[in-house]
Structure formats: structure tokens, C-alpha cells
Amino acid sequence: MSFLSSAINPKDLFTWFLEVIPAILSVAVIVYTYNTFRLTPLLYVLILIHCIILMIGGHYTYAEVQLFDTLKKIFNLTRNNYDKVGHFA
């Protein structure tokens, strides 16, 4: 999921903005400091993965991510656990 696709028809626009603003700020800081403070390629990949987790959580809200709703039904869970993925990341 890209930044633009997460912005198209989110569940709640204000919630989307609050969830995605850390990703926007972190990318801005990384771009600004790239020439003076480079990170390892692994760290860039991990930051990208975390940004994607934030964008998905912002688009659907963490409690209603569709894949985890399906997993909830399959494994007979009481709740959608996508927020745990976000907290782990």
C-alpha cells in the first residue's frame, strides 16, 4: 500500500492523518539528513515496513484491517490483532 492509496477514501480522514503523520515526518527527516547521516540499508527497509504498517492502520483503522478480520474468523479470535503488529513494529 502506498501513501496515496492509503489516502483514498480512508475510514476516517482525521484518524488517517494522525496515523500517517509519523511516517511523513520520518521520511522528511531521512531525506533531509541523508547526505550527513546515512543509515544502513536494513534500517531503511525496516523503516519502510513500519511506514506501511502505519498507512494500512490509518486507512482502515487498526481495529478493522480486513486481513486480520479474516484471521479473527479463521482462528476464532475475540478481536482484530493488527494493533499488536503495529505496536511490535
Image (spheres, rainbow, N blue to C red):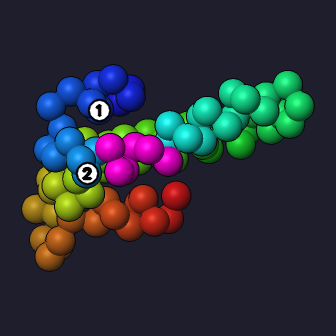
* Residue stretch rendered in magenta on the structure: 17-22
In percent of width and height, residue 23 lies at 50, 42
The outermost residue toward the right is 36
Q: Secondary structure at mark 2?
A: helix
Q: What residue lies at 50% left-to-right and 48% top-to-bottom?
A: 22
Q: Relative to 84, is 63 on the left or the right?
A: left
Q: What residue lies at 78% left-to-right and 33% top-to-bottom?
A: 33
Q: Is residue 40 above or below residue 34?
A: below
Q: Relative to 72, is 31 on the left or the right?
A: right
Q: Disc 2 marks which residue?
A: 15
Q: Relative to 43, is 89 on the left or the right?
A: left
| In magenta segment, residue 2 | no
Label 1 Cα crowd, 10 Å radius (few <14 / some 14-19 / many 20+): many
Which callout, 1 or 2, points to the residue nearer the camera? Answer: 2
Q: Which mark is residue 68?
A: none
Q: Amino acid at mark 2?
A: Thr
Q: What residue lies at 73% left-to-right and 29% top-to-bottom?
A: 32
Q: Is residue 54 above or below residue 84?
A: above
In percent of width and height, residue 44 lies at 68, 36
Q: Amino acid at mark 1?
A: Ser
Residue placed most toward the observer, 35 or 42: 35
Residue placed most toward the observer, 15 or 65: 15
When asked about the image quadrant of residue 56, the answer is top left
Q: Which mark is residue 6?
A: 1
When asked about the image quadrant of residue 68, the answer is bottom left
> What is the spatial separation of the Cα atoms under label 1 and label 2, in whole angstroms?
12 Å
In percent of width and height, residue 15 lies at 25, 51
Q: Secondary structure at mark 1?
A: helix
